[in-house]
Image: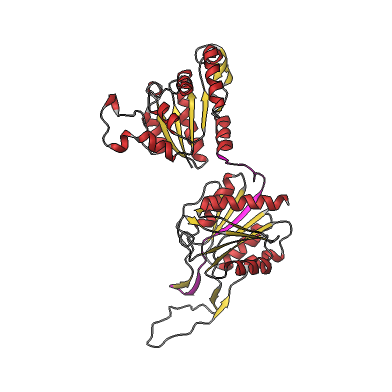
Amino acid sequence: MKIALGVTGGVAAYKAAELVRRLQQEKLDVQVVMTRSAQEFITPLTFAALTGKKVITEIFGPSGAEPANVESAIEHIAVAQRIDLLLVAPATADILAHFAQGIARDFLSTLYLATKAPVIVAPAMNVNMWEHPATQENLEKLRARDVYVVDPDEGYLACGMTGAGRLAATDAIVEKVRAVLGLRRDLEGRTVVVTAGPTREDLDPVRFLTNRSSGKMGYAVAEAAARRGAHVVLVSGPTELPIPENVDWIPVRSTEEMRTVVRERASGADIVVMAAAVADYRLAATQSQKIKRGDAGITLELEPTPDILGELGREKGSRILIGFAAETSNLAENARGKLTRKGADMIVANDVTQEGAGFDIDTNIVTLFLRDGRELPLPKLAKFEVANRILDQVLEIWKA
């Protein structure tokens, strides 16, 4: 998700640097917007270094210079359309007044008017300014427009006075962001084991059997579960993906290796999500030397690999078990059959021949097949969003 962080001119502006880091830990893409006054307290370079992005400071460029192109001239509209949230911290009495009156005097106040995304303000100012009727009236106007306000803390202020006006704690601001964006912590205290990616079954020292799985769906589930507070164990076949933060990552290569790790870790898990596309067959006898090319064809004898999902289903206990089915035909029939045979609580099935639902892409089109007979088709979504929909349903199963 993308958010714009507005930083305005107050002593608390330096705290916005730590806030950027905390927002990044929530996997949020942060675009910093600074007012001219904010730059008197902290430099744009600080935020540029933290975010790796240009910090927006002016509508028309430095000192009213002409914009370099049309895109920069209407940048506030582009930012307004692509963000999921506008957060202003610290928010001065001045910016609150401009927001409340609808005055667009700079990039930040113009962005406020141009965006339809939710808005959060975290005020910080002198206690007298905070308590002034004008400030309180402006806050009431903003609240009436569904602007979320993170009230300031009380304590010793930079001006030497004591009272309300100190910028709220970073934890409180981040918690409000989580709540507004729906970044839930509803899996805290749960252990989730997720498998991802393909497995490889050796034919000889240089060749192996595998499939086209990239691991993106399983990694998305692991990341989503971790962000929702779970202790996540990610058992991964060979992939080229970055390891999600805050997960225990265990690399494996073959189906047998995955089976060993999963059975060991599943014993202490509340939820097991088998998103890996394991190889279904392996060579009955792996060759110790490279198989040489000849003029005639060769026949390879294959045997089934271990059925990890089926084994877990037979020993499921109170765990919630989720399986996946990548199909090319008869989606519902095959998914229902797998649900019954494997003893799972839900099968996440997709037709990999559909555009937007195949391998090694960032979207998926799935249907959730449940033991109570329901089928929940989802539209084409980003795999991270699919992952959250799966976890939402897991919690529904848990409640039931």
Q: Quadrant of residue 107?
A: top left
Residue 203 in the magenta stretch? The answer is yes
Q: Nearer the viewer, residue 349 or 289?
A: 349
Magenta-drawn stretch contains 191: yes
> What range of the chain is rendered magenta?
181-206
Query: Residue 137's x, y, as percent?
Result: 54, 17
- In the rendered structure, the answer to whether residue 107 lies left or right of residue 18 reads left
Asked whether 285 or 180 is in front, the reply is 180
The residue that appears at 69% across and 61% down in the rendered structure is 373
Colouring rule applied to residues: secondary structure
Q: Quarter of the image holding residue 156?
A: top right
Up/down of 106 relative to 225, above or below:
above
- Residue 124 appears in the rendering: yes
Residue 111 location (% of width, % of height): 42, 31
Count of numbered badges drawn on the protein: 0
Query: In the rendering, at what x and y percent does residue 247 appear?
Result: 56, 49
* Residue 248 appears anywhere in the view: no
Left or right relative to 242: residue 261: right
Could you say where residue 208 lies in the image, as x and y percent from the top left? Answer: 47, 72
- State the residue lying farthest toward the bottom: 296
